[in-house]
Amino acid sequence: MDEPSNLIAWRRLWPALLVLSVLALLPVGQAFEAPLAIAAALGLIFAWRMRDALSEDPGVRLAIMLFACYWLAALISAPAAIAPDKTWSTVAASLRFLPFVLFAVLLLRDPAAWPQIECAVAAVVVLWLLDAWVQIFTGYSIAGATEAERLSGIFGAGNLKLGPVLAVLSPFVLAAARDRYAGRGLVVAAVFLLMPILLAGSRAAWLMYALVIAVFLWQQTRAPLRFAAWGLAALIVIGLAAWSADRDSPAFAARVQRTLLMLRGTPAAVDEASAGRLRIWSTAGRMTAAHPVTGVGVRGFRYAYPRYAKAGDSFVDAKGNEGAMHAHQLALEVLSETGFIGLLLWITGAFAAIRAWRRADANARRRAFAPGLALAVMCFPLNTHLAFYSAWWGSLFWWLLALYVTAIQKAAAEGRPTPLARAAGEGGTAREASGGVRGTPPPLVEYRRET
């Protein structure tokens, strides 16, 4: 007996909705943890059902490899951590990321679904952009009034992450616009993103978005002269947008003026231009020198900060005996909190992710382009960063990794069933155990049969 078509459609749709709900709930405090936890729990169940074939699946192997590099760095830092309770709790909480990625790898491997997934991500970001544009013109968004110095958008004045999040997720919007409306759509989407990112006031986001635009321009031109011409046009548009923002937004103008202090070249001017980052980085260097092997422990930066900060450092809270929250730079965060062992593990993970890209075919690269570019600009070393071991930014990092690992799988792209799909599809008993019906593909893992 055949299943109703709407039931089959729902079985293919609900895993994507669960993964996308993590993104959609990011602006709502810790609400994103609920779908993340549900997906992680289901990931454990499905991984157990298919345990005999897990080791043969390239997507699963890549997911485990990346997670091991991230989690082992944290685990190794824990025994000698300065704030052991905080470090060990972070190590324990990070365990949820592996089954979450496995959930995506096992249930979102159908290549035909990826254009819809990409469009759905873009749609979520466009809604945030519309809210940001409303706030630009009215001073208010869904989350309330704008913050005094920055555009806060849907994240609210108490959670100033709009700029970095829009910049990181911009590849999804630009790719969807380009695929649907070609070059004109790409230009419109790029301009639509520009002003909210500028007014959000995060200079790290400005650099990330500039890198994204550069990559898309190169993809469109594929020739140095054409790239230079279009790059000049993009700089003119950015300059006009910055001039408009400088004229209409005193907060933006003040941020630009503070950035220009760096041209003086003195340590005090550079520290002021970087909002005190120079002091934080110097302190992170001293932490690394004192704990070179395993660092001070993940998320222990703020507790170790007063020990290594210079006298009079304004980031030190004498009452709470704490300092700056984190190193504000990925390499220094890893070095200061997990030591050189952690840095080596992170480099190994980056190499594994890049190798997966190099070995993938054209279709897999096309699917993985948006999450891959988002991860590249998120981790770009010559920039400032949020904390990758924090619950919020770490969850977005692993959400993107889940999409990347799932999209880059070569076997699904070629239309052949993966080892996991073959294991799930052997015999009627396996189908019935997984909730399927004889004669239909198993609902847990979708694939395209060979014809």
Image (spheres, rainbow, N blue to C red):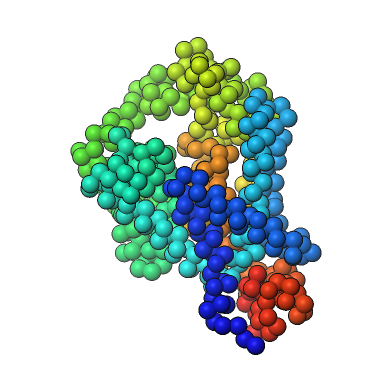
Q: State the image coordinates of residue 365 (x, y, percent, origin top left).
A: 55, 62
Q: State the image coordinates of residue 228 (x, y, percent, origin top left).
A: 35, 52
270 to 369, vertically: above or below: above
- In the picture as drawn, the residue positioned furthest to the top comes out as 311
Residue visible at 41% across and 28% down in the picture? 274
Residue visible at 63% across and 38% down in the picture? 90
219 to 92, vertically: above or below: below
- In the picture as drawn, the residue positioned furthest to the right comes out as 52
Residue 258 relative to residue 370: left or right: left
Residue visible at 42% across and 42% down in the picture? 161
The quarter in which the C terminus is drawn is bottom right
- In the picture as drawn, the residue positioned furthest to the bottom comes out as 1
Q: Is residue 352 visible?
A: no
Residue 172 relative to residue 252: left or right: right
Residue visible at 50% across and 11% down in the picture? 311
Q: Nearer the viewer, residue 324 or 228?
A: 324
The image quarter in which residue 149 lies = top left
Q: Is residue 434 visible?
A: yes
Please count the marks in the image. 0
The image quarter in which residue 348 lies = top right
449 to 97, vertically: above or below: below
Q: Nearer the viewer, residue 134 or 224?
A: 134
The quarter in which the N terminus is drawn is bottom right
Q: State the image coordinates of residue 306 (x, y, percent, origin top left).
A: 55, 18
Q: State the image coordinates of residue 346 (x, y, percent, origin top left).
A: 64, 41
